[in-house]
Amino acid sequence: MDTKDLWRNVLGEIELQISRPNFLTWLKNSELLEKKEKEGLVLVSLPNNFAKEWVKNRYHKLILGSLRNFDGSIRNVEYTVVSLTTPRTLSGIRTKQPLASATLTEEKTQLPIVELKIDPKTNLNPRYSFNNFIVGTSNELAFAATQAVIKDVGKKYNPLFIYGGVGLGKTHLIQAAGNAIQENYGGKLCVLYVTSEKFINDVVWAVRNRRMEDIKKKYRDIDVLIIDDIQFIGGKATTELEFFYTFNALHENSKQIIMSSDRPPAAIPTLEERLRSRFEGGMIADISYPDYEMRLAILKTKTKNQGLNIEDKLLEHIAAKVQKNVRELEGVMNKVAFYEQYKNEKLDIKKLDEIINETIQVSAKNITANEIIKAVADFFEVPQNDLTERSRKQEIVEPRQIAMYLLRDVLKLSYPHIGERLGKRDHTTAIHAYEKISKEATQNPGLNQKILLIKERVYKG
Ligand code: ADP
Ligand code: MG
C-alpha cells in the first residue's frame, strides 16, 4: 500500500469514530507525507500549528492505532505543518510543497499571532502588557495593587501576592508589571521573572553542584523578583529555605517581590510557617472569575487586536457560555476564527456550541470521583476515610457536603450514588448538601473560594 492509500484508509476509519465537524475541521486536509521505514515513523502534515497541536493532543492515539491496523511496522507518528499558499476550501485543494520545506515551516501559523521575543535578561514576554489587559470587577484589586507597586517599587506593597484560578490572568498581570517597571524606569531596575519550577531547578542544580554562591548572586542581585506559581515551592525543604533567605535578603533591602499562586498563602498546605507569614506580611490580592461584561470585553478587544472578524452574536454567545477561564475564552475565539477562515463558512450557534463543549471538556475529562474526594480531603487535611465512611465527626460535616456538591457539580453523579459513596448516606442527604452548598457559595465568598481552589486542584490533576 502506498502512503496515499494508507492514509486514505486511516482517514476512512477515523471518520467513523469522531464527529463529522471534527473530522472536517481537523483531519480532512491532513496528509501522510512520508514513511521512514527504518524507524517505523510516519510524518503527517497539517495546515497550521494550531491544527497540528490540536490533532497531536486529541487524536494521536486514534491515528497511531489506526495506522497500525493497516501497517504493523509503524511505531510512531510525527506531525508537521505544511502551510497553505492558497486559501483553503472545503474541497481541500491546495498547492503541494516538497517535504523539505514542510519540516521548515513548523513555526508558521496562519492565524495572525504576533511573534514577540522573550527578553533573555528578564525572562519577560513583551506580549504581556497592560495595553491588552482588561480590568473589571474580578481583577481590579489585583490590578490596583500592581499599579501601586509599579509606582513605588519595593516600598509600598512588599511582597505583592496575587492569587486566583487557572487561566484568569495571573501570569499576564505579573509579567505586565515587570514590563511596565522596565519601561518606566528606563531599564535601570533589574527585573527577573521566573516560574517557581525554574527557581526550584536552579536550587536543586546548585546544591548538587555545590554552586550555591551562583544562586545567591543571581537572585539577590536584583531589584524586582517576580515568581510565578509559587505554590509549587511548598513542601520542598531546601528550596523553601533558599527562597526564605533570598526573600529576606531582598526584602531587607527594599527590593520588590511579586508572586502569583493558585491559592492564598494560608491554603498552601505544606508551606513553612515562616514563609507563610512573610507572604502574608505584604499585600494579598485575588483574581476571580470575570463576569459576562468583562468576558465580552476581553473577546472584543482580542478579536480587534488580532484583526479577527467574528460576529458580535457569536462573541456574545461565547461570553455567555465560557465562564471560568480566560484561556478557554481565547481558545474558543481562535477556533472560531480558524473555522471561518479555513472553511469559508459562517458558524452557526450549533457548531459554536460543539466547539465550546470540546474546549471546556478538555479540562473536565478523566476526572474521577476518587480524585475529587481526595482533593477535598487534602484541602481540609482530613483523612479520606472520614469522608467515605460513616464518621459523624463535626469537622467532617462541611468537607463532606462540599465533596457531595462537587461530585454532583463536576461529575453529575446521581444523588443515591453520591450518598452511598460519601458515608453511606441517603440520597436526600446528598440533595440537601448540594442545594445548601450551591446556595451558600453564592453568598459566602470564603466558601466560594474554597470550592474554586479544590476544583482547580482537581482539574490540574
Ligand atoms: P494564569 O497565569 O492565571 O493561569 P494567564 O495569565 O496565563 O493565566 O492568562 C491566560 C490567558 O488569558 C492569557 O493569554 C492572557 O493573556 C489572557 N488573559 C487573562 N486575563 C486577561 C485579562 N484581564 N485581559 C486580557 N487577557 C487576559
Ligand atoms: Mg500562569
Image (cartoon, rainbow, N blue to C red):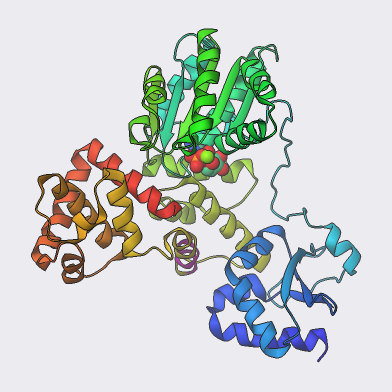
Q: Is 185 positioned to the left or the right of 37 in the image?
A: left
In the rendered image, the quadrant that contains the C terminus is bottom left
Residue at the location (20% across, 71% down)? 417
Residue placed furthest toward the bottom = 1
Residue 445 placement (x, y as % from top left): 24, 36
Q: Please tell me in which quadrant of the rendered image residue 206 appears.
A: top right
The magenta segment? 351-356
Does residue 315 lie above or below 194 as drawn?
Answer: below
435 left or right, relative to 308: left
Q: Residue 6: give x, y in percent of width and height.
A: 75, 87
Most foreground residue, 262 or 211: 211
Q: Residue at x 22, y 43 (%)?
A: 442
Whether 354 is among the magenta residues is: yes
| Image position of 214 with respect to 8: above or below | above
Residue 318 locus on image (x, y percent): 45, 54
Q: Quadrant of the N terminus?
A: bottom right
Say how many tags the image has: 0
Secondary structure of the magenta portion, mostly? helix
Compared across the picture, whether 416 is left or right of 346 comes to: left
At a point 46% along the width and 15% down the height, the residue shown is: 158
Name the image quarter holding residue 139.
Answer: top left
**Is any atom of residue 130 visible in this view?**
no
Q: Is residue 41 visible?
A: yes
Please tell me whether residue 191 belongs to the stretch shown in magenta. Answer: no
Give residue 441's position: percent from left, percent from top.
22, 44
Please tell me which residue lies in front, 130 or 369: 369
**Residue at image location 33% in from the left, 45% down from the top:** 452
Does residue 367 sit above or below 202 in this rendering?
A: below
